[in-house]
Structure formats: C-alpha cells, structure tokens
Amino acid sequence: MGKQHGYEFEKEIGKSLELLKEQPFFRNLWYYKLVDTYAYDWIKDYIDEPPKQLDVHRTAQSKYQMVLPKVPCDFLALLEGVCIFIECKSSKDELGFPIGNIKDHQLAMAADIVKADSPFYFFICKREPRNNILYIVEASKIIEMINVAKTGKIIKSKLAWSLLADTAMRTIPKGKGRVYDLSEPLKTILNDSKQ
C-alpha cells in the first residue's frame, strides 16, 4: 500500500466517524485513532533527544529507532457498549487488493479479536481518480479469502475487486468532502453484535 494514500484514507475515515457524532443516534459514539509504527517513524526524526526510559538505537535510515508494539487496527469505535475494531487499507491497483498489504500480525490479531466475540472489520478502499469505493468486510471473511488464495493450486497475490464487492457487508462510494456515510454500516454492525 502506498503510505501516502493510506494515510489519506485513514483521515477520510476519521472525518467520517467525526461527522457521525452530529447525528442523534451516534451522539455517544467514541472513537480513537491508534498510532501505528509507520506514523511514529515519521515523527521520530523530529525528536531532539530520545526518551531515557526507552531502548533507542541509531540507524542509517533514521536518527533514532524505537521499538513499538504492533497495534491490532487503525480505529477503535465504541457505541452502546460495543467496541468495533476497524483496520483501514487502500490500493490503487486496478485488478484487485494486494494480499501483501495485510500483515500476518494483523490477521492473527483480527482472528483473536473475532474469537473473543468482538466485531472486527476491514475498511478496504479502491482508490480511483475521483471515484473511491469503500468495501466494508468482516475480518473472518478476509481471513478465509486469504487462506483460500494462499492454499489453492495457483497462489493468488490479490483479492479481485469483484470478490470484495460480493463479500462486503456494505459497499460505499466516497461522498462530498472526502467522507463516507458510515451510519448504516455501523448500525448493522451494532445490531449484529447484540444478537
């Protein structure tokens, strides 16, 4: 995944979640953007002195290298006592979503979270000029599709966009102001988790 359009997509999802709070149903929505290692890589070059309590090493690529724990997702959203895990992914690939964009630790953490009976969704964006499309797919379905792709007679490196469209619980085009209408998908996720 290109980091730049990945960060742009994360900003779009953050803005979309913030706009939900203007609706009466979502007035008590709480969400939090988790900082990932890549985001911290960008910040760390601006640190004058490394924090004393952390093991910090100089590298050729950067002034400091800090070991940070892997995070399970990009956003946590909490509504009516239900915590929803959201991992944002995007790609400009015309044929499909590259499987390599989802790291093994993300799949393992997603599987553990689903096993613990909490909703975990991949928000996958097909980045097209002036026409981005968001596919909201359950983590369990992504894991299943990747396992099939990796264990078939022909190992596939991408999930076709048509397959994601068929598997997604919701497909949403980007609206005005670089946002997506997440109201119906979040209501569906909330209702499904309470059954």
Image (cartoon, rainbow, N blue to C red):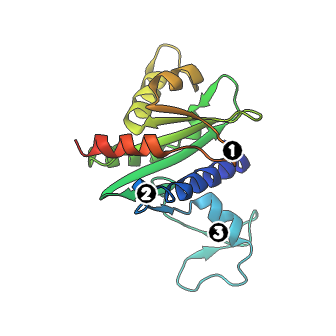
Residue behind mark 1: 176
Measured along the vertical axis of the image, is residue 80 above or below residue 96? below
Neighbour tally class for label 2: few under 14, some 14-19, many 20 plus, Cα within 10 Å: few
Residue behind mark 2: 24
* Of pointers 3 and 1, the one earlier in the residue sequence: 3
* Of pointers 2 and 3, the one earlier in the residue sequence: 2
* Of pointers 1 and 2, the one earlier in the residue sequence: 2
* CA separation in Å, label 2 and label 3: 44 Å
Residue at x 68%, y 71% (from the top left corner): 44
Residue 57 sits in quarter: bottom right
Residue at x 55%, y 46% (from the top left corner): 88
Nearer the observer, disc 2 or disc 3?
A: 2
Q: Judging from the image, what secondary structure is the residue with disc 2 in?
A: helix
Query: Would residue 41 be seen by someone viewing this image from the given angle?
Result: yes
Residue at x 59%, y 44% (from the top left corner): 180
Measured along the vertical axis of the image, is residue 47 above or below residue 140? below
**Residue 11 pos. (x, y %):** 64, 55
Left/right of residue 193 with respect to residue 150 in the rendered view = left
Name the quarter where the C terminus is drawn. top left
Name the quarter where the N terminus is drawn. top right
Towards the viewer: 94 or 28? 28
Q: Amino acid at mark 1?
A: Lys
**Residue 3 pos. (x, y %):** 69, 49
Residue at x 76%, y 35% (from the top left corner): 130
Q: Which numbered marker is on residue 65?
A: 3
* CA separation in Å, label 3 and label 1: 39 Å
Residue 159 sits in quarter: top right
**Residue 191 pos. (x, y %):** 30, 43
Query: Would residue 107 be seen by someone viewing this image from the given angle?
Result: no
Towards the viewer: 73 or 106? 73
Measured along the vertical axis of the image, is residue 63 above or below residue 152? below
Q: Amino acid at mark 3?
A: Gln
